Amino acid sequence: MNRRWTLASSVAGAVVVALDGTVLTVAQPRLQRELGASLAEVQWTSTAYLVAVASLLVFAGRLGDRYGQRRVFALGLLGFGAASAGIGIAPGVSWVIGLRALQGVFGALLQPATLGVLRAAFPPDRLATPLAVRTAAIGLAAAAGPLVGGALVSALGWRAVFFVNVLPALAFGLPALLRPQRTPAGPRTPLDVPGAVLLAVTLSCLVHAVTARPVSGAGLAVAAVTAAVLVRHERRTTSPLLSPAVVGSRAIGAALGVLVVVSAALFGALFVATYVLQRRLGLDPLHSALRSLPLAVLMVASAALCPVLLRRFGARGTTTTATVLLALGVLVLSGATSAPAFGCAFALLGAGFGTVMVAATQVVVRRAEVAVAGVAGGLQQTALNVGPAVGVATASALMSTGTGTALLALAAVAALGVPLARALPRTDTAAPPPGTGDAHALPDPEDEHTAPGAGGKRTASGAG
């Protein structure tokens, strides 16, 4: 399929996931009231999804590498839509929780594949622009989510927010599933099921531990033990899930570290800011959302500008500067009392995070070989799921000491990204590793058709 449709499909998949998370927050109070659910049960409608998706992202990426990114993308998107429809007709909160966990499974299949299809379809030196479009779309979805969710819940009820996912799932998932495609060429790499199980247990325990109130020490201990066993297993197995080509790359490791700390700082800061705006300043949800609007605007603008910055300053300079901006935004937020101060803080947060998202993700996806692009995408998505969970847990633990103290600590967390960013490649022109199946030289094994209007003849895969 041509590159434009591939990009549209990737954006649609990413936006469906982003929009689902934001509109759920708006729908939860009405859901709790109509289903007679407890606060703990409502919290599990989020936690069940988060645990499922975070624990399976890397293994789902491996499935895409083995069976084809477009095929896994289609299964993930259609399954996500079907689970959403099921939640929309669920008779009780237990059904909602179970279906949210199932939705998380399909979300895990979908998210790495939205990056994998781009890596297969675009040459490495052209990845920054499609990643920027994808990031900008996610920013728009995050900004529109509360407004869309509020309108749907007010007019049609909480169930309507889940039916929104069905149409894009069918529109982009069915063509990707029904179109004939080839299985990736070459011998199939073993899936490493023991490694997948150990990683799933580690991540699920970690995410559950940090999202519990209070933080679960037992969960952290289990996560540490299984992580140690996982490392031992991966070093001994002949076909590790966590490929040395990915986890052994200094650049990829640094990029993943940056994504963890900046997402932790951002979402922790937003958690505290919501408390300040709504409880201390007495703003309603709509007006507090309007105060934070510069974040979404600058996130979209910075994502669009990032490819130019990468060409001029390289991944290291661009990411380092953006990380500093984000840390500065958290610092400004810690002392903000007026609308202009909040606007400035949110603008810095948006500019920093939008740029880091494109620049660091571009390093992860570009530096990974096509054969392990799904695993690389899974690790990138894992970083963006674990980071916010850690950030919100940190903010919650420090709120008793004061919002200013909590935000200063989160600014320090963001600052940890600066030395990590300094480990990224200086320029953005490095050639991909040997044997990558670079899109300049080799056709994509999933698709034998030439992509029209894609800047030259080559074989491109697509997500539909």
Image (cartoon, rainbow, N blue to C red):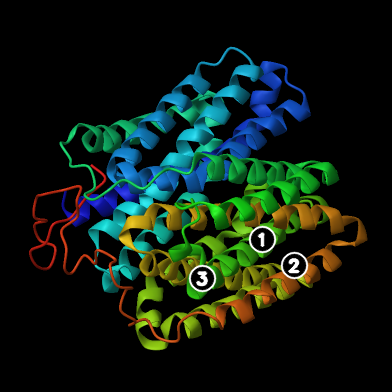
Q: Which of these two is toward me, 313 or 159?
A: 313
* Disc 2 and disc 3 in contact, CB within 8 angstroms: no
Sort mark 1 into few (<14), some (14-19) or many (20+) by Cα contacts within 10 Å. many
The quadrant in which residue 23 appears is: top right
Residue hosting label 1:
264
Secondary structure found at label 3: helix
- Vertical comparison of 194 with 429: above or below: above
Residue at 55 percent of width and 65 percent of height: 256
Tell me where residue 398 appears, x and y as whole percent: 86, 59
Q: Which residue is mark 3?
A: 356
Q: Which residue has dot 2 on it?
A: 410
Amino acid type at image mark 2:
Leu
- In this rendering, is residue 19 above or below 258? above
Contact? badges 1 and 2 (CB < 8 Å)? yes
* Dot placed on the residue nearer the N-terminal end, 2 or 3: 3
1 or 3: tag closer to the N-terminus: 1
The residue depicted at 32 percent of the width and 83 percent of the height is: 429
**In the image, farthest residue toward the right:** 401
The three-letter amino acid code for the residue at tag 3 is Val
Q: Is residue 107 visible?
A: yes
Q: Residue at x 64, y 30 (%)?
A: 45
Q: Nearer the viewer, residue 288 or 58?
A: 58
Three-letter residue code for mark 1: Ala
